[in-house]
C-alpha cells in the first residue's frame, strides 16, 4: 500500500510512466530492491555508512536503504525528478525526508562531486545495461572521484559477445558489454574490477569496483550463490511434488495409505 492506501500496480509494461514500471518489470520491483539491499549488507554496508545510489529512480532500492542508514547517509542521483517525488510519496512517505534527510541530485551527467563528500558504497544497478560506452566511462570516472581506498562500487551490466557501439541511451531496451570492456574502463579510472556471482532476477552480471586491496577483502560469495541455486531447485521439486499430490488419483491413494496405517496401528499387539 502507498501513502494513499492504494495497492501498487504491478501489471504495467516496463518503461511506462508508472513510477514502478518506469524502472523495470513492476512485478519484480520488490525483488530487485531486496536483492540490492541483501548484497550490500552482505558486503559490509552498515547503518553508519554512506551510500550513493546512481539512477535511484522511484526509490526501488532507496525504500530499503533510506530507513536503514543513519540521517544523511543516503544520496541519490536521478535525472527524472518526478520519479523521486513519486517514490517518496508512494513508497516511503514524506516524513522520511525530515527523519532521515536523504539528499538528491537531478543531473543527467553522473556528477557525483555535487554532494561534496566521499561515499563508503556506490550503487549503479541496471545503469550500464542501457548506457553508451562514453556514459559508462563517465559514470565510473565520476564515481572514482568520490571514492576512498575503502570504498566499494557495485554495478550491473548485461554480458554479451560484443560491446554496444551506439551513441544513444537505450530504454526500455537493453545493451550488452563484455567483461573485458568493463575491466578496461575500471583500469583507466584507476580502479580494479571483479565480477561477483550474486543472483539477479533479470540475468544481469554484478561487478565490484574499488582499490585492489578493497576487492581482496570482498567476501567470496560463490558458496551463497550455490545455496541460492540449490534452494531454487528444492523449491521447484517441492512445487512438482505438490502438483502430483494434488492429483485426484494420488489423493485417493494417499488417503487409502493413511487409512491402512491406522488400521494396522489399531490391530497391533495388546497386553
Image (cartoon, grey):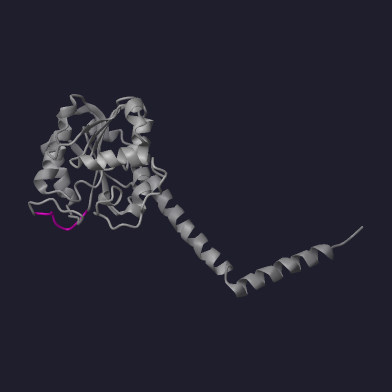
In-image side of 33 versus 140 (left or right): right
Residue sitting farthest toward the bottom: 249
Residue 124 visible? The answer is no
Q: Residue 3 in the image: x percent, y percent?
A: 39, 40
Residue 60 image position (x, y, % from top left): 32, 43
Instruction: Name the residue at the right extreme.
Output: 271
Q: Nearer the viewer, residue 260 or 95?
A: 95
Whether residue 149 sits left or right of residue 262 in the image: it is left
* Number of disc labels: 0
Q: Residue 78's image quarter?
A: top left
Q: Position of residue 14 (x, y in %)?
A: 27, 55
For the point 15% across and 28% down, the residue is 113
| Location of the C terminus (image quadrant) | bottom right
Assess whether residue 209 is covered by the magenta stretch: no
**Residue 257: x and y, percent?**
70, 69
In this rendering, the answer to whether 142 lies above or below 240 is above
Q: Quadrant of the N terminus?
A: top left
- When the figure is inspected, residue 34 is found, relative to residue 270, above or below; the finding is above
Q: Is residue 250 above or below residue 21?
A: below
- Residue displayed at 14% across by 44% down: 136
Residue 211, compared with residue 249, is above or below; it is above
Q: Write the start and end of the magenta stretch as one range.
A: 159-165
Q: Quadrant of residue 59?
A: top left
Left or right, residue 123 beside residue 94: left
* Residue drawn at 66 percent across, 68 percent down: 254
What secondary structure is the magenta-colored segment mainly? loop
Amino acid at each position: 500500500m502507498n501513502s494513499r492506501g492504494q495497492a501498487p500496480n504491478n501489471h504495467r509494461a516496463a518503461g511506462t510512466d508508472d513510477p514502478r514500471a518506469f524502472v523495470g518489470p513492476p512485478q519484480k520491483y520488490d525483488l530487485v530492491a531486496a536483492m540490492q539491499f541483501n548484497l550490500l549488507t552482505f558486503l559490509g554496508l552498515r547503518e553508519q555508512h554512506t551510500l550513493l545510489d546512481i539512477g535511484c529512480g522511484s526509490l526501488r532500492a532507496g525504500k530499503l536503504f533510506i530507513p536503514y542508514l543513519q540521517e544523511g547517509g543516503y544520496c541519490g542521483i536521478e535525472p527524472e525528478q518526478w520519479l523521486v517525488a513519486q517514490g517518496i510519496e508512494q513508497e516511503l512517505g514524506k516524513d522520511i525526508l525530515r527523519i532521515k534527510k536523504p539528499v538528491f541530485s537531478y543531473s543527467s551527467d553522473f556528477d557525483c562531486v555535487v554532494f561534496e563528500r566521499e561515499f563508503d558504497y556506490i550503487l549503479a544497478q541496471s545503469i550500464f545495461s542501457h548506457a553508451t560506452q562514453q556514459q559508462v566511462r563517465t559514470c565510473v570516472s565520476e564515481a572514482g572521484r568520490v571514492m576512498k581506498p575503502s570504498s566499494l562500487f557495485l554495478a550491473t551490466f548485461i554480458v554479451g559477445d560484443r560491446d554496444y557501439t551506439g551513441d544513444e541511451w537505450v530504454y526500455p531496451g537493453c545493451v550488452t558489454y563484455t567483461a573485458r570492456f568493463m575491466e578496461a574502463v575500471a583500469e583507466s579510472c584507476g580502479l580494479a574490477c571483479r565480477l561477483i556471482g550474486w543472483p539477479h532476477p533479470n540475468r544481469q552480471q554484478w561487478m565490484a569496483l574499488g582499490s585492489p586491496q578493497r576487492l581482496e577483502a570482498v567476501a567470496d560469495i560463490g558458496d551463497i550463490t550455490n545455496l541460492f541455486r540449490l534452494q531454487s531447485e528444492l523449491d521447484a521439486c517441492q512445487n512438482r511434488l505438490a502438483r502430483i499430490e494434488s492429483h485426484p488419483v494420488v489423493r485417493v491413494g494417499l488417503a487409502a495409505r493413511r487409512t491402512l496405517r491406522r488400521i494396522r496401528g489399531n490391530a497391533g499387539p495388546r497386553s
